[in-house]
Image (cartoon, helix red, strand yellow):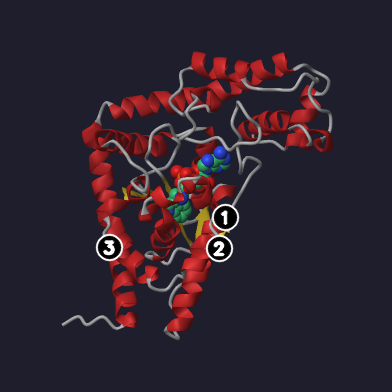
Amino acid sequence: MGLIFSGVQPTGNLHLGNYLGAIRNWARLQGEFECIYCLVDLHAITVPQDPAELTRSTREAAAGLIASGIDPEGSVVFNQSQVPQHAELTWIFNCIARLGWLNRMTQFKEKAGKHRENATVGLYDYPILMAADILAYKATHVPVGEDQKQHLELSRDIAQAFNSMFEVDFFPLPEPQIFGGATRVMSLRDGSKKMSKSEPSDFSRINMTDEADAIAQKIRKAKTDPLPLPETVAEMEERPEARNLIGIYAALADEEPEATLTRFAGKGFGDFKSELADLAVSTFGPIGSEMKRLMDEPDEIDAVLRRGAERARAMAEPVVREAQDIVGFLRP
Ligand code: TYM
């Protein structure tokens, strides 16, 4: 049986993309696998964060996972900074990975933009910390959205490089798991951009905490083209906004996009959008109110995360210690 590890940045505004691309799948995998789900606050600070807001949004992200059906008694749920083994293993991996490997990372190029010289060293090193997250537990499966695929390939390269450098068969090569029809949810304002927490316009995304009115309004205003709904998947491929909304509908309804197209064939976007809004409200209404209820009990959230971190440390400690032995660090 495999071990699952995945993570989300606790930087506010968990959104529909995080939910469909990752969190909903995390909840569904719980019966089949042992699962570790991490709020990656060390990753979050690779770009500046307001300290009080980071604390608040770490609790909120924990509430989001629990409200989405992740059971913190069964799965291990914790925030990364509480388990020092992540940072310890990162250093070893820093001394294995090559600059050339990181220079290929498209997410760094996107995030650093034109101001590359001004990006933090942490932002550059981000994918190495991801490899340490996964391999500190020898996790074998990593459920993520499509945007993380390149980072996971790097994790495999690092595992392999460690094994061959020290002539051991120590780290497994973790497998990405990219499921479902909504592995890349796009912005509601621009079908060529990924839905993202950091996009300035709140109209670009549906947040898991949005109220029904806000969800309906954002979907009503979502960009579309002037044509009626496409009738075939082939026709949809050339219309990014239509494709995105149909993909979201199909994922929320747990059906194939073909089934959604058959249902709405020939209709205008007005009718479709109002049904899509109902579907989104019926998904996020209960999740959002449960998140708010949990946020009123911050001590309970903290207790869950404390317990999760204890369990995570107990799992990561022997693995990282053995990796240190392999490297040859003296433990007098
Ligand atoms: P983050 O917080 O950016 O995203 C968390 C998860 O949500 C998915 N996701 C999306 N899926 C579909 N459509 C979108 N628009 C969309 N936006 C985000 C991401 O693919 C991700 O699965 N670096 C990771 C966090 C991380 C991690 C790890 C993941 C840190 N360590 C180890 C796996 C294993 C990230 O992107 O988080």
Q: Nearer the viewer, residue 196 or 295?
A: 196
Mark 2 Cα shell of 10 Å, populated few (<14), some (14-19), many (≥20): some
| x and y, in percent, of residue 176 in the image | 56, 58
* Residue 296, quarter of picture: top left
In this rendering, which labeled residue sits more in front, label 3 or label 1? 1
| x and y, in percent, of residue 195 in the image | 55, 35
Residue for badge 3: 314
Cα distance between the residues tagged 3 and 1: 28 Å
> What element does badge 2 sit on?
helix
Amino acid bearing label 2: Glu
For residue 246, above or below residue 26: above
Counting residues from the start of the chain, the first of labels 3 and 2 encountered is 2
> What element does badge 1 sit on?
helix
Looking at the rendered structure, the number of numbered marks drawn on it comes to: 3
Counting residues from the start of the chain, the first of labels 3 and 1 encountered is 1
Question: CB under 8 Å between callouts 1 and 2?
Answer: yes
Residue for badge 1: 149
User: Which residue appears at 28% of the width and 36% of the height?
Assistant: 50
For residue 216, above or below residue 257: above
User: Which residue appears at 78% of the width and 33% of the height?
Assistant: 236
Residue for badge 2: 153
> What element does badge 3 sit on?
helix
Answer left or right for 264 relative to 98.
right
Cα distance between the residues tagged 3 and 2: 27 Å
In this rendering, which labeled residue sits more in front, label 3 or label 2? 2
**Which residue reaches farthest bottom?**
167
Mark 1 Cα shell of 10 Å, populated few (<14), some (14-19), many (≥20): some
| x and y, in percent, of residue 85 in the image | 29, 63
